[in-house]
Amino acid sequence: MISYPIYAAGAFVTTSQELEVKQPYDGTVIARTWLADADVLEKCIVAAQLAQFAMKHLSSAKKYSILNKISSTISENRQQLATVLCKESGKPMRYALSEVDRAAQTFLVAAEEAKRLPKEFISLDWTTAGERKEGLVKYFPIGIVAGIAPFNFPMNLAVHKIAPAIAAGCPIILKPASSTPLSMLELARIIDASELPKGAVSILPMTRAVGNQLVTDERFSLLSFTGSPEVGWEMKKNAGKKKVVLELGGNAGVIISRTADLELALTKSIVGAYSYSGQICIHAQRFFVQTSLYNAFTKQFSERALALKRGRPEDPSTEISEMIDVENAKRVESWIKEAVAGGAKLLCGGIRDGAYFMPTAVTNTKVEMKVCSEEIFGPVVTIEPYDNFSDAVRMINDSRFGLQAGVFTNDLQECEQAFNEIEAGGVIINDVPTFRVDHMPYGGIKDSGMGREGVKYAILDMMEAKILVK
Amino acid sequence: MISYPIYAAGAFVTTSQELEVKQPYDGTVIARTWLADADVLEKCIVAAQLAQFAMKHLSSAKKYSILNKISSTISENRQQLATVLCKESGKPMRYALSEVDRAAQTFLVAAEEAKRLPKEFISLDWTTAGERKEGLVKYFPIGIVAGIAPFNFPMNLAVHKIAPAIAAGCPIILKPASSTPLSMLELARIIDASELPKGAVSILPMTRAVGNQLVTDERFSLLSFTGSPEVGWEMKKNAGKKKVVLELGGNAGVIISRTADLELALTKSIVGAYSYSGQICIHAQRFFVQTSLYNAFTKQFSERALALKRGRPEDPSTEISEMIDVENAKRVESWIKEAVAGGAKLLCGGIRDGAYFMPTAVTNTKVEMKVCSEEIFGPVVTIEPYDNFSDAVRMINDSRFGLQAGVFTNDLQECEQAFNEIEAGGVIINDVPTFRVDHMPYGGIKDSGMGREGVKYAILDMMEAKILVK
Amino acid sequence: MISYPIYAAGAFVTTSQELEVKQPYDGTVIARTWLADADVLEKCIVAAQLAQFAMKHLSSAKKYSILNKISSTISENRQQLATVLCKESGKPMRYALSEVDRAAQTFLVAAEEAKRLPKEFISLDWTTAGERKEGLVKYFPIGIVAGIAPFNFPMNLAVHKIAPAIAAGCPIILKPASSTPLSMLELARIIDASELPKGAVSILPMTRAVGNQLVTDERFSLLSFTGSPEVGWEMKKNAGKKKVVLELGGNAGVIISRTADLELALTKSIVGAYSYSGQICIHAQRFFVQTSLYNAFTKQFSERALALKRGRPEDPSTEISEMIDVENAKRVESWIKEAVAGGAKLLCGGIRDGAYFMPTAVTNTKVEMKVCSEEIFGPVVTIEPYDNFSDAVRMINDSRFGLQAGVFTNDLQECEQAFNEIEAGGVIINDVPTFRVDHMPYGGIKDSGMGREGVKYAILDMMEAKILVK
Amino acid sequence: MISYPIYAAGAFVTTSQELEVKQPYDGTVIARTWLADADVLEKCIVAAQLAQFAMKHLSSAKKYSILNKISSTISENRQQLATVLCKESGKPMRYALSEVDRAAQTFLVAAEEAKRLPKEFISLDWTTAGERKEGLVKYFPIGIVAGIAPFNFPMNLAVHKIAPAIAAGCPIILKPASSTPLSMLELARIIDASELPKGAVSILPMTRAVGNQLVTDERFSLLSFTGSPEVGWEMKKNAGKKKVVLELGGNAGVIISRTADLELALTKSIVGAYSYSGQICIHAQRFFVQTSLYNAFTKQFSERALALKRGRPEDPSTEISEMIDVENAKRVESWIKEAVAGGAKLLCGGIRDGAYFMPTAVTNTKVEMKVCSEEIFGPVVTIEPYDNFSDAVRMINDSRFGLQAGVFTNDLQECEQAFNEIEAGGVIINDVPTFRVDHMPYGGIKDSGMGREGVKYAILDMMEAKILVK
């Protein structure tokens, strides 16, 4: 069995607490790694403090060279990294490959942005008090970053914290999900082979108890958490003086307008609904279809959902596979049962087989049902009809979440209305809410989080303005 | 009779050459002023050179105060300025008032932008050659500006050169049109009462012969010309080393798409077609209407054109009045005759009465006819049907001009296509090409000019970057 | 006695709990107002919720007009507002007038920035996933703002929350300090006379117990607090899901370098040290003087400190007057005693007379003494010698605070070093840390706060990004 | 002998007119290539027109990939390209290698900037006229670019036109200098191997007569010329309607202030004065040394000048070698003679040996002498003393040129004064005017040119703004 020592303060180490990593598909153990204990974490924090000086003084050229090298090494090891990622997460190979490509792209964008850190030059002589004075505003690294990443994009969501931190000049300690730490430990080797100062990056699987120090320890200046809303908002309360960025989930909505291109809407929607079994923060969960298209849409959507190819994740033709564990599949099953008991109607799916859950669509739901109001994080969608576009917008907004929304329309006014009125961090026209490229600002409002990621925006959160007046 | 001495190097002076200003409506002389001769011009150039130092060193606070004061004084004298402008240009009062308001707004925006002149702060350590170096980029006044303004917006188009020049810290000598110099000489008094250094602004009516020195004299660093394409491009050839900004005319097109709001399109189109008898650079000249709407549009358009109220310009209810002079009315008449002789069909109008020309629309035109291919600068439009949106775009682009275009549509794809494919400086959705607000970038491509006005953009053209490396 | 009803949800109301406002100079009661109770606060929160729609939909033109009108009305009532402010705070008239001018300027800048809210237009086709897609990023009002302002700049520090909130389109409920609520209630009348939607601004004196709801109530989306570090950081912990901006204090340092202009340094330092008896967040507290200048500086500084004219605050010639209350004067006295007991030497001052405390300077201090390590918020400075500039920077940084610092130098390398190494939100060259103009980014790092004010930066904190992808 | 077919419209072709390329060092023929005739040029123009559509529609991803590939291929062929460049230009190997590295860097920066083309999103509702309207500003390729490059940086100065053109989406026809076309024809092969649409780049050695069509032909939308002032300004007059960017020369000044680090100043100055025998637009030509340092500086400068190692350009240890041809060496000789005849004193050098000219310094010059007032483009400097910094600034500015200037100082006020008062496109603190990195804005004022290069700035000149109002 392969062993993955953890990456602590520039060294690969083991601890007394072994962690077996299992394949969600069939539960076989694929590798072992270790959980960092409090001592290891302490050592990493001290090393991060020591690395601060070197990190702050890296030139643009050096940061570019480090980040670009990591990016190209990821690309060179694309297939191998995707295989690890595919196995540990049960994510079908096609999506694993795409995630690795995005991780490389995220490092590349960070390399470029490291040369373009924000700087301002402003006149201060707007009143006589500032006569003959000018201001230079430069952004300096905020301090040590604590990053916590989830299981569903084990690599790219962690990279969205590490790459900006390096670009900003901040040391970072990253806690990957305990179920999926391997791809990040692979990445640790790539990072370690670069010219990055040792101690600037540590990658430490931890129990939640040990990891909680990332939240409470005042030596961290920023906590960047991606995960569930409940955990995230609780962390904010315990974070002390540090800044907090929360990338949480949602129950993203999609509108299929009267003027939509139906074929386009169907093709995109199936992907948004069922890729990686819906275990995606911006999974397309709630569909609102204009009455005139409702029957055609639901019929074809259900047919295509049922036609998705189930299989082993490593098989390149697989479109859907097991969820991350049986517990989650059972949770999804219970939510569906609650909905059906409350009057909802199954359009397709609804059946569980171990950790596998069939692509499912329900209609006739009520807004209080969990399938509507909570983040389902499974291969389930609701599809409801609407008459007027304003109704659809109102239904999208009738949620405590607000991450992204998709709108299929060819109507200029609907497009404007969607942008101005949908309460979310992103509105995607003629695509599903699941759309994301790595340099765009990304993040939620309402209970879906605070702060924005996307390389340039994440960097900004990791820096502090200082003005020189002269 | 009222006398308007000209504004030369901070003094109001007369010369040996008197200039009578006549009302286009009935040809009566309303005031006299004077034409600057070469000596006066020379004195103003020298004064401008002397004012350069003071202008360069004005603080933001002082520039703001000067420009804001001019703006508010214009607003306070709104009615009186509009009356002068209305009389000298024959522009209906409603449009004269709007022009005065825009002049005040242009000075206000310049006041604000004077505090926000472009400044950059960049890192230079992208390679080892620049290690530890940073760059500050500051924009300095380019030098003395020569401005030449046309008769059709005697005030605001001149203000679009003067206000940015003050904000940029450049002295300026402005030549108004000889037919409409009065409103600018009124403005000269307002400027003179401000704290602007004397000599920084001169306003000199001149013959074209004398004025040609604005083009050729190397002491000017920038020539900013608004007027006809022929004159403008010829000036560029003779401009020596100086920078040239040309705001010329066009034969702006309008598309009425299948998805257009017909009532909105009609209301806006009548204004774009006939306000100030079409004597506007962004006059809506060529209409392309989707076949399904063609009959309805032409019928109602003609009816509304004929219903426009002719009258004295000073009468607040007047919608259309005499053109600037009989020569131009005759020119328009001859172009219509050429078109009709070539097979074009009159939808309405076509009749001249002295300097007055009826609101006119023709169809069945050919692209080579002057009414299509040249800038008509009169109350004439062509209206032609089209089938596919791509055809309409192609017809719009089949012109040597490219200033602005209007597109009435509610279709998202048509909107995108219009933006990406129409060859013009501006594409106005659901409004006529005649739309302009004073802070937006405005200017043409192809034969319609080079450079952009709109306060911030005009300021940029009047400044030069200097980098400090350290 | 004058009565000031409080400004609740667009109405001026009284409550059952009266509040007498006393003049710090002699303790006489100058006016009465009322404390908002929980019912009044609830009513204001509901009104703010109702005003959200109207605020979000205000055009730039309307916001500009409202904010500009408030600004000019403040200027028109300059003398009267300054008198109220002078009386309630005991701030000498010269400083009160300057604060009123700055409040007018802050509203003016907000008026201008309301037209320039951040907007981005980005290409998304950096990878094939984003092919043919573009992104528009627009910033929307974050929600209802809770503002808490301190006694020391009763007007302008509150205005730094209200003006940006209006520009951003956010309703705001502001709690002024209970000791100095009058100038803000004067401002309330000016705001009420504008066209701002009712309920968008409430100004409510409150007990700390009632006011705590501003911290905990989840209907507020942002808490913007200016005040003491202890209170501020505690609030952050209790703020729930809302965003928090903290503008706290510090113990600002000043370096007088070997190359300093001594006369300039002295003139500015006396103002930074003693204006408003040092009751200023960016009061110049810790002076570090290069050995070669140390004797000359301390001698002349002490002489000038003793020459400051004590008097009634309303007297235009008064330079220093009573502190806000006896308690604070006693606290300052005890800190001085502690320092002297520990070996510090008085250079001048050190004597208390009721609420008045003499301009005081001490030397030979230790870093642990309260006069060094805490925010003194009184007319006291420490002055210590240093040899190398790097030592001075190290001493400045040896503090848990980091708001602003002043550096008197004419050396290019010292200037660069100060910018890059001093840990503070602002480094002021050849001026005291007390320097601030209202459009510059302002705020602290370390224990001095989080977030930046300065109109544009405050607005940014009050808005949330939304991207439209198409 | 190696043959280099020219790169015409995507094909490598020969013509009837052969061109032998000689090594300046010893006059031996090193390769042959061909001169494009009018027919070849016409074919390339037509191909460029045809390529416009494809170029306009390249995605950011594709542009990045093309430009990045060219950059990395240049780096891979670093040694070989430098050898060609070294031979054709007689540039010492160390400088040839550096130029190749910069060419790679220029393409890399262009790759990155291709993803960041300027885009604006602005509100238009500043007045009621624009209510509910917003503007999107996008920059589109200006059309076909004509580029003319000089012999002294045969590769990188041409690349500064080609790389931005590709990033902007403009086809380009580039004319290299007839004496140094080989390195660009090497680059042509690298470009041809990329996925760039054929016809988008042509590289055509031409006689001046044929090449003049680049200036006059209206099918080009932009002429970008780097070369001598006389030729450049004449071209501007004949350029018709097209935009013109001129990167011309100068007689760059250097100030050595009282506070300068003498060793640093000497080290940098020798490089700025004599690298590539001063055949550099930003060659450090006129030195002004504060009286107190004058003797020490001139003595050590002369010693170091004489110690420079003359040799074959290919020899890695060579520091100075032959000039581009005997004619230029003779011209330099005659200017020195004129100066000495007029009273100037030789500090070192002054001797010609064929095409070689010794490193030379003169003092006691007058401002009218050619060595002062003209661009010497040879290994010659003048060194004069000054008393006050303001005198030095005045002497720098006493020139019709204004490209860059160097200032060695450690005084903050001198630094500010230099930035604000020196008339040049760039002021380099503590380095020679010869400093340039490829992403910084670079270009001259006065007779030194118009427009700015530096990748981002060059791209901007190659694009035209279009606003979408909606």
Image (spheres, coloured by chain):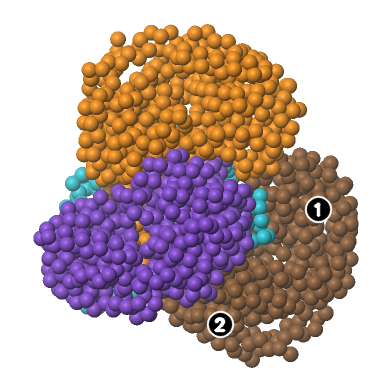
Chain colours: A cyan, B purple, C brown, D orange
Identify which residue is drawn at 37% across, 61% down.
D135
Q: Is residue C333 visible?
A: yes
Residue of label 2: C192
Q: Position of residue B226 (x, y in %)?
A: 39, 55
Q: Is A80 placed above or below A98 here?
A: above
Q: Chain of mark 1?
A: C
Q: Amino acid at mark 2?
A: Asp
Residue of label 1: C266
* First in residue order: circle 2 vs circle 1: 2
Kindly identify which numbered label has been placed on residue D108: none
Residue density around tag 2, few if under 14, some if 14–19, many if 20 or more, within 10 Å: many
Q: Is label 1 in a helix, a strand or a loop?
A: helix
Q: Amino acid at mark 1?
A: Leu
Identify which residue is drawn at 66% across, 89% down.
C17
Instruction: Tell me the quadrant of the picture where the N terminus of chain C can be found.
Output: bottom right
Identify which residue is drawn at 66% across, 78% down.
C77
